Image: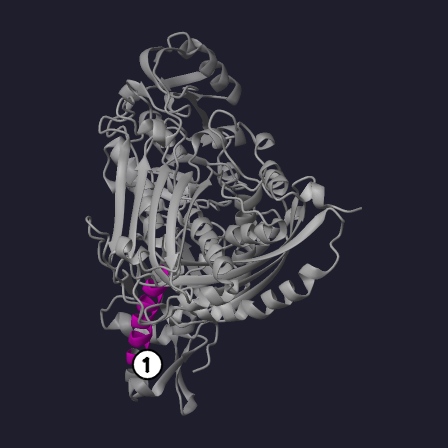
Amino acid sequence: MTAKFIGTDITHPRIWEKAMGDALFAADLAPDDCLVLKALRAGRHHAEIVSIDYSEAEKLPGVVRIFTAKDIPGRNTTGIINKDWPVLAEGKIRSMADAVALVAAETEQAAQAALRAIKVEYKDLPALLNPFDALKEDAPKIHEGGNLLFTRVVKRGDAEAAFATAANIIEREYKTPAIEHCYMEPDAGYGYVDEDGALAIVVCTQNPHFDLGEVCAVLDLPEDKVRIIQAVTGGGFGSKLDITVQGYIGLALYHLKRPVRYFYNKEEALLATGKRHPMWITIKTGVDKDGKLVACHAHITGDGGAYGSYGIAVATRAAVHATGPYACPNVDITALEVYTNNLFACAMRGFGTPQVAFAYESQMDLHAQALGLDPIEIRLRNALRPGAHTATGQLMTASCGLPNCLEAVKPYYHDAVTTWVKEEPSSPTRRRGVGVGAMWYGCGSTGAANPATAQVEVDENGIVTLFTGCADIGQGSSIVLLQLAGEVLGLHPSKFRLVCADTKYTTNAGASSASRQTYISGNAVVLATTEMAEALKKAAAAILEVGPETLELDDGLIRVIADHAQKVTFADAAKHIAKAGEALRWEGFFDPDTTPLAAEDGQGVPYGTYAFACQMAMIEVDVLTGEVDVIKIVAAHDVGRGVSPANLVGQIGGGIGIGQGFALTEEFETGVTESLTDYHIATVMDMPEIVPIIVEDHEPSGPFGAKGIGEPALVPTAPAILNAIEMALGERIYELPANLERVLDASRKAGWPDKLEF
């Protein structure tokens, strides 16, 4: 049956207010009479707190109250997996961002004056700023349990025996840096006591129901006494999964019962929020004479910084994905997550897969070169297909779209290497290169329950309301969920009322992360609306005295398929249902079919489905300056079913922008990077021409066959660019970013300055 709304471009409900600058973010919504909150940050890596004296600070004009750890009524720690991050530090400082006191004042000026007047005495401790120092036997303990937070092992087959049969073996070391998320809206929120007496916190967030649980734990309150409302959120990319301002707002609101606000400026956002995990990856891969993988051995060390956040999930996902989207029968992979005194590392678009993709895709090109194979061909020979098993032993049964993505990119690649790369570049000091990168990405949490719920209701006027806890952070989940609901009910998405991400009215949809909302919340919405559709048909059948199977839903009507003159409205059906004493509200619940990974060897079914992609990069390198220009990216992505094509194209473009920064310019250093002046993010002027290609390999467990796009959009970009740089220079770079200095060093190693002829 032809889809009505799926696969069409429908305007996002908030697109115009954002485009015109009319959208109200958390900083815009806060009332003028809010008290201002500011935290005193430690500004040192590792120390004991000897004393805190705020007696002079609280006497200053405009200062209402100063809070320390002793004022927290409940649990003084938060954390997504490990509850190890103090709201206000007590006893020990583990990172420069640790907050030791919270000021509530009438004005920003009064709050800043109070911060300057607070006296804290510290006893400095040795700082551990890389994971290898932290793992030494005599290293001081950052946390009582030691500095090794977690180890994930994935083993299958016999890797060592398989290497003995390999025709070509390559072993290399790769390094990736910490990365700042660089969303446009710094973390912000405000709080007030609502009409029911609940502490209401309006905040930019990626997971309001997680926030609810954490704030309740900190304040020792039941969930009906706290309410989290997601404000329009100006980006997140993973960082807004962690608690930031929520705990401070909740604490002050709990004690003062007055409206309060806390907004990070960009400098505080850089200091106090999580980063992408730096990783050190040693990987050894072997292939047979035909280029097919026979074995993979990898050791991955992740710098988690001072607190756990999503570190266990990042290490696990990195290990699971370390073989790439390829069938490899023998694997031996270990990933470590290590505490250091750096700023904490958290989720960032990809959860460890961008880092390992840089490694495994570089390996694939090295094998192709050694065997004289085309880079597309070697990937086609190894691509996961139905019937293949992953490194965790999961049998792939459907929706393995990598071969289709590779085939879609192939003509562009061959045209580029046979024609474009041989043309005269824009300057005699420039060399051209073309590279490809492939990826896979499991949608949802790894081997753990991560369900979503959704509700739909119709009133006796026929108005349909969709309730979802899903936080739209700019990725477009709201329009996707409305399109899915509309498809089931035959109702245009613009005719729904949407209530989302307010814990008073919506139930848990889980985090807007891990490319899970289209797949998981989408399924919950489809299940809820399917129940509603069946109830409406049943009611209409009783009114019209026909069988429910003879009816269809279309534009607020339930009508006989063979005779459209016979019809009733949604309002008529709703009244009939209500008269029978039945509820006019239906719920959907969906949790992917997964199994936990075995602790000893990582075997299991970590994800219900995987996204696949291939990207090609065309670049020019100036061999005298190290400058790299990305000219074009061709991006083929298997999305299962494209619900919102324009949304998909937007996600691909945004992902490529982040992937390009990861590849070429972005690197965050704790204690060094203090503002965006010190951090080189790609701008719109750096964006290449993008050719998006939507590949649809139907996912049977997805809503109308759909799966995710959020993370996959950026994962293959850096590998494609780095492989292209290697083609241009004849020298490979093994550490990101491939900035001017590293590219120039590679150029010199390749002898380019001496080869130039003017």
The residue lying toward the viewer, choosing from 284 and 628, is 284
Indicate whether residue 604 is drawn in magenta: no
| Magenta part of the chain | 521-538
Name the outermost residue toward the bottom: 562
Task: Give the colour scheme of this rendering.
Answer: one colour
In this rendering, would 148 be left or right of 460? left
Residue 197 seen by the camera: no
Residue 170 seen by the camera: yes
Quadrant where the N terminus is found in the figure: bottom left
Neighbourhood count class around disc 1 (C-alpha, 10 Å): few under 14, some 14–19, many 20 upward: many
Q: How many marks?
A: 1
Name the outermost residue toward the right: 758
> Magenta: predominant secondary structure element?
helix
Corner quadrant of residue 462: bottom left
In this rendering, would 207 be left or right of 628? left
Which x, y percent locates residue 543? Answer: 31, 83
Which x, y percent locates residue 427? Answer: 76, 49
Q: Residue at x 36, y 24 (%)?
A: 128
The residue lying toward the viewer, choosing from 487 and 652, is 652
Q: Which residue is mark 1?
A: 540
Q: Residue at x 46, y 41 (%)?
A: 176
Tell me: residue 355, above or below residue 59: below
Q: Amino acid at mark 1?
A: Ala
Name the outermost residue toward the top: 56
Corner quadrant of residue 246: top left
Tell me: residue 60, above or below residue 100: above
Which x, y percent locates residue 308? Answer: 31, 36
